[in-house]
Structures are given as structure tokens and as C-alpha cells.
Amino acid sequence: MATHLITGGAGFIGSHLADCLLGRGEKVVVIDNLSTGSYRNIQHLEGRDGFQCYVEDIRHESLLNELVRHADRVYHLAASVGVRLIIEKPTASLINNIVSTERVLSCASRYRKPVLITSTSEVYGKSKQAAFCEDDDRIMGATHKARWGYANSKATDEFLAMAYFQETRLPVVVVRLFNTVGPRQTGRYGMVIPNFVCQALRGLPLLVHGDGSQTRCFCHVKDVVPAMIDMIEHPQAYGRVFNLGSDREVSIKGLAEQILGKTGSQSPIRFIPYHEAYPTGFEDMQRRIPSLERVASLIGFRPVRTLDDILTDVIAEMTPRLEEERGLAEQAS
Ligand code: UDP
């Protein structure tokens, strides 16, 4: 039985990774400062055999050092994520993303531990390629636009990972996640599916940015997490970057319509200009599709869950949560 350290393990993806590993009989140690993660995501694991949690910032160097030393694998998911958070708190987000990753890499290198670094499709920037391949050029916007700062902070993480591999042969794999979604994802930081589902269930307008013709490819977290485990175990993954996600495209307007249909909600769709949704200078990407060739040839990856499966799971999780919140609000009033 191996011990897996998950930084950011109380986050949306980290908590599903913890579930998956524990389900396979592995040991899991989580470190999370609960800044964007939530205790609620791991509450059900508390007291379970093989599970340990530290509520602490990973920049606590001596603790991180000890946790990495005792781990067999390290999954680094702790980061400032979500377009809204990055735009609202750019300094803290940039510093956090770069410093934390450097510390994780340096500890993993010290103890020669396999480490998986989670990056993002944001690193492709506003490239207009039909499908993004890992070795493609990246096209970034101006430095006064915070979104590109986030993209570059994650790209810097990738450069660091590659540098450690090159100089110390650290067994490190970089995974670029494309719109990973599913239960437990919060809408607090701007992510579209939890926002739309919440708006639909509450009978509020679904706020579509722009004309809704922009597209994304959404991948169920339960397809993503086993692939991450396969990749950290695969020696041919080390020193390489992989896209991970779905390549099935949907427009944001189409997504809103599908959510209305599935929830039976009478909510209207309201189109709001980007400058109302985000501060000035924000730029969106019209399309973002991964090439999955590399990850498919390494581990045979293909997402199996459809957008309909994703929405079924998100709605099933969110419905009782919103009812609970409504009950509490009624009690308080
Ligand atoms: N979006 C939207 N309404 C929302 C939240 C997001 O129309 O309430 C749009 C957003 O502008 C983008 C797409 O949905 O075009 C996906 O946004 P998200 O933040 O989920 O992911 P990302 O932009 O990182 O792909």
C-alpha cells in the first residue's frame, strides 16, 4: 500500500482524487489551507482508515518537507484557480502558484519522489488552433490583463518542472487540465457549470457572457482522476506534458439550454456583455479543444462520461445542498 500526498486535497479535484485512491486501498495524506478548497469536500473521509489531513499552507516548509519525505507519490493540486479569483487577487494568486510549485518540486527532488504537477489549458492562451497539441506555440495577451498572468504563472510551473527533470531527473509529469467539472465544484470563482446549475435550480436568469457562441469541452472529474493516477505511475510520462480532458465541444449558450432542459427550470437565459461580467481588459477564448493523442497513446485515455452524465451528477449533488441552504435561511429569518 503506497502513501499519496495530495496538495490541495480538499479542493474539488483533489478530493475526488483522494476518494479514488482510498477506494483502491491506498493511503492518502492531504494538505490544504482551505482557501479555495473546503472542509466539506473531505468531511466524509475524516476518520477513515488510511486517510490523514493537515489544514496548513504548503508554504509551511518543514511540514511540506516531512510530508513529501514520507510519501510515495506527490500530486500537486494546490493553486489559486478560477478566472474570477485571479482577476480579483492577482498578486497573491501569482505568487502562490509559482512559490508553492517550486517548493513542492524542490522537496520531491530532494527525496526522489514521483510528482504530478497540475497545469491548465490556459497556458495555450488565445491560440486559434483547432485542437491544442502539447508542443504548440503559446499565444499570450498583454501583461496588464490578469488572465494572462495566471496562464503565465502556470506556464512558469511547467518550466520549473521541466528544469528539475532536466537537471535532477526528477520523475515529474505535467498535466494540462481542460475544463474539469463535476460534483463539488464551486461557482464562487466564476466556473460556468456550477453557476448555471445553481441559477437554474433557484429560478434565476442564467448569465451567459457575450453571445454564448464561445465553446468549451467539459470533462467529468471521475474520468480525469484515474488518468492522473495512471500517469504518475507511468515511467514514460516523466519529463513530459500531457493534455487531459474531453474533446467534445459545446457552446456556452448550448450548455445553458441543456441545463434548463435537464432541470426543468423556467429561468430565462440572459446575455451579458463581457465588460459587465469582468473588469475592463478581460479577454475570453472563443474555443479550447485538446488534442488527446499523446495521453491516449500513453495510457489509452478516452473520457467515457458525457456532458449529460456530468449535468446529472452536478444537479444531483447541488439540489439537496441548495435546499439545505434555503432551509437554514428560512430558519434565520
Ligand atoms: N461563463 C458564462 N457565465 C458564467 C460563467 C462563465 O457565460 O456565469 C463563460 C465564460 O465567459 C467562458 C465559459 O463560460 O466563456 C467558461 O468559463 P469558465 O470560467 O467555467 O472556464 P474557462 O473560462 O476557464 O474556460
Image: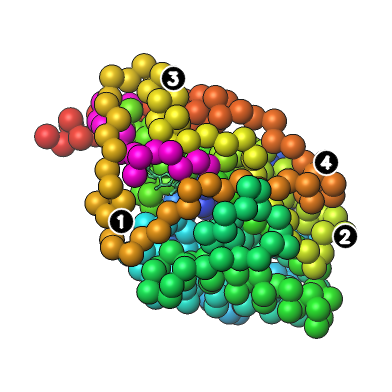
- Residue receiving disc 3: 262
Q: Position of residue 270 (x, y in %)?
A: 27, 34
The kind of residue on which mark 2 rests is Pro
Task: Tell me which amino acid carries mark 4.
Answer: Gly
Query: CB of mark 4 within 8 Å of CB of mark 3?
Result: no
Give the residue pinned by disc 2.
Answer: 235
Looking at the image, residue 125 lies above or below residue 293: below
Amino acid type assigned to the residue bearing label 3 in the image = Lys
Which numbered tag is attached to residue 78? none
Q: CA distance from mark 2 to mark 1?
A: 42 Å
Look at the image and tell me in which quarter the C terminus lies: top left
Image x and y of residue 8, in percent: 55, 59
Q: Quadrant of the rendered structure where residue 84 is? A: bottom left
Is the residue under label 1 in contact with that under label 2 (CB below 8 Å)?
A: no
* Residues in magenta, as a range: 201-216
Between circles 1 and 4, the one closer to the viewer is 1
Tags 2 and 3 in contact by the CB under 8 Å rule? Answer: no
